[in-house]
Image (cartoon, rainbow, N blue to C red):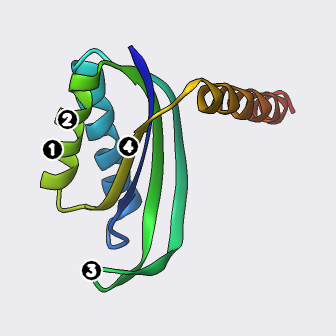
Amino acid sequence: MNNYETVFILTPVLSDVQMKEAVEKFKTILTNEGAKIVNEENWGLRKLAYPIQKKSTGFYAMLEFEADPAVIAKLEINFRRDERVIRFLTFRQDKFAHQYAEKRRNLKSPKKEEVKEN
């Protein structure tokens, strides 16, 4: 099993509920194929560097997961078929990227726990 990270941009005309449904759809595709979701981040509505399909903003989402290489092909086919997805990028993390991602997750975790305690 390899470590992967995928970032995808959803069209800005979606409501929050529709955006969450789209992210859940891709998470279920991964889990049904035997992947383990390690981290999920919603980066929200952001301005694009250049217009894509005449849109200047989009909802960014990032999924970090462990999976077999065959799962990636199925995930990317579903990205291409879904009209809500403007762009996507999936890459395999090498050991250095994986270590960096773990450190980044660990730095974020204590802040969330402090907020919950207060």
* CA distance for labels 3 and 2: 24 Å
For the residue labelled by badge 4, is the local secondary structure a helix, a strand or a loop?
strand
Q: Amino acid at mark 3?
A: Gln
Q: Quadrant of residue 15?
A: bottom left
| Residue carrying label 3 | 53
Q: Amino acid at mark 2?
A: Ala
Asked whether disc 2 touches disc 1, contact meaning CB atoms under 8 Å apart, the reply is yes
Q: Residues within 10 Å of mark 2 (few under 14, many from 20)?
A: few
* CA distance for labels 4 and 2: 10 Å
For the residue labelled by badge 3, is the local secondary structure a helix, a strand or a loop?
loop
Q: Amino acid at mark 1?
A: Ile
Q: Amino acid at mark 4?
A: Thr
Depth check, front residue: 18 or 40: 40
Q: Residue at x 29, y 27 (%)?
A: 30
* CA distance for labels 4 and 3: 21 Å
- Total marks in image: 4
Work out whether 20 lies above or below 115.
below
